[in-house]
Amino acid sequence: MSERRLLLLPGDGIGPEIMAEAEKLIAILNAERSTGFATETALVGGSAFDDGGEAISEATMGLAMGADAVLFGAVGGPKWDGVAYDKRPEAGLLRLRKDMELFANLRPAICYPALADSSSLKRHVIEGLDILILRELTGGVYFGEPKEIVDLGNGQKRAVDTQVYETYEVERIARAAFELARTRRGKVTSMEKRNVMKTGVFWNETVTRIHREEFPDLTLEHELADAGGMKLVREPKQFDVIVTDNLFGDMLSDIAAMLTGSLGMLPSASLGKADEASGRRKALYEPVHGSAPDIAGRGIANPIAMIASLAMCLRYSFAMESEADALDAAIAQTLEDGIRTGDIMAEGCQKVGTSQMGDAIAERFRTRLAA
Ligand SMILES: NC(=O)C1=CN([C@@H]2O[C@H](COP(=O)(O)OP(=O)(O)OC[C@H]3O[C@@H](n4cnc5c(N)ncnc54)[C@H](O)[C@@H]3O)[C@@H](O)[C@H]2O)C=CC1
Ligand SMILES: CC(C)CC(=O)C(=O)O
Ligand SMILES: [Mg+2]
């Protein structure tokens, strides 16, 4: 079997702590299945800035472009608050997303049965929840130009961010949403602010047209993003696939994280377009959460978002469905067995640290692979 090249970018804060747990699972895969994962590790974010003055080096960008998939931890932290804007840790992640053209960010929010009481919402609201937020990742206000703070010379300044979307960008994310919905419950809810934003009007018209012309057998609904956010916490199970822009997707997916019990539970896959010759997509897998500076270095972070991101990597980059299922099942079993990090701790459960949670999942994963 040819080698599968995985680039590991642990990053900052809790990033290296949770990445170490994903590495245990990669080692098990190689041992039990001869999957031939070859890993290489590089710096990104604040740690890359400290090392070489940039949030990501050209050499690391080269490794990312050549890898079969990238596993990413998290970047950022107060240590780099004073760093120039274009060199801040988050700029490394934004460059990866832009240069690898990772336009489709899949953020599934699943409520594991064992965690139905860990959410701040009532059990009946979230029990059985399985929704997918599809966030446009390479356009919109995070990337639009101009993006500047201008000194007006009269004691005033003007700050500008620009929300821009072109036809091809909305068309391709809409198609991705419908294709994903076809493998699920067949319903797409598009969220924008067409009542106050031109990009919202354009987004709405484009998604509607793609639905009418290419996916008329599926259900399409529209929500204004603010009301959509309210419905996401009031009655989240009404949704299947939610497709939305870069900014609203960032916010709505952090909200959705709390439906699952903790931000430490939410994985993501960022996928590019398929290469015409090989059919392969560039891809990066990362937790939805950040570097959690408030708990970094204490060995208490929940590694499940990182581990579930590895499961998505197996599924989407390597078509290893049974291994991905085994990993997801190992996570569910660990939670059923009452093993919990602090963020999802409940009465009568066993409180563990990052490494013990990783070991518990690894043990159950190995057993399932061997069965
Ligand atoms: N993809 C990335 O690398 C992202 C990076 N960031 C960066 O991370 C830094 C911190 O940002 P925050 O706003 O504090 O967001 P955050 O997601 O790092 O943390 C928010 C809260 O959730 C908790 N939390 C997050 N992940 C957890 C885990 N795995 N286990 C247990 N608890 C967890 C944290 O302790 C904190 O209380 C900032 O520099 C921000 O820019 C933020 C979001 C995404
Ligand atoms: C660039 C990231 C720090 C933005 C973010 O919060 C995210 O992508 O979830
Ligand atoms: Mg975010």
Image: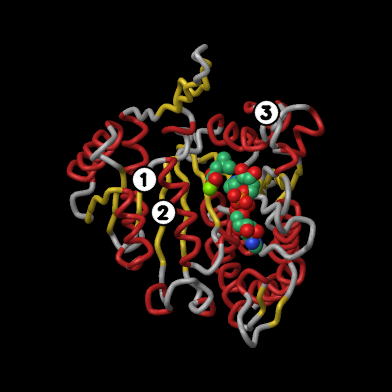
Question: Residue at label 3?
Answer: 87
Above or below 223: residue 273:
above
The mark closer to the camera, 1 or 3, is 3
Earlier sequence position, callout 1 versus callout 3: 3
Under circle 3, the secondary element is helix
What is the number of the mark on residue 133? 2
Q: How is the image coloured?
A: secondary structure
State if disc 1 and disc 2 touch (CB < 8 Å).
Answer: yes
Residue drawn at x 67%, y 44% is: 75
Residue 80 visible here: yes
Q: Is mark 3 within 8 Å of ligand 1?
A: no
User: Relative to 25, is 98 on the left or the right?
Assistant: left
Q: Is mark 1 within 8 Å of ligand 2?
A: no
Question: Residue at label 1?
Answer: 244
Question: Label 1 sits on what residue type?
Answer: Thr
Earlier sequence position, callout 2 versus callout 1: 2
What is the number of the mark on residue 292? none
Question: Label 2 sits on what residue type?
Answer: Ile
Percent coordinates x, y for residue 15 in the rendering? 71, 51
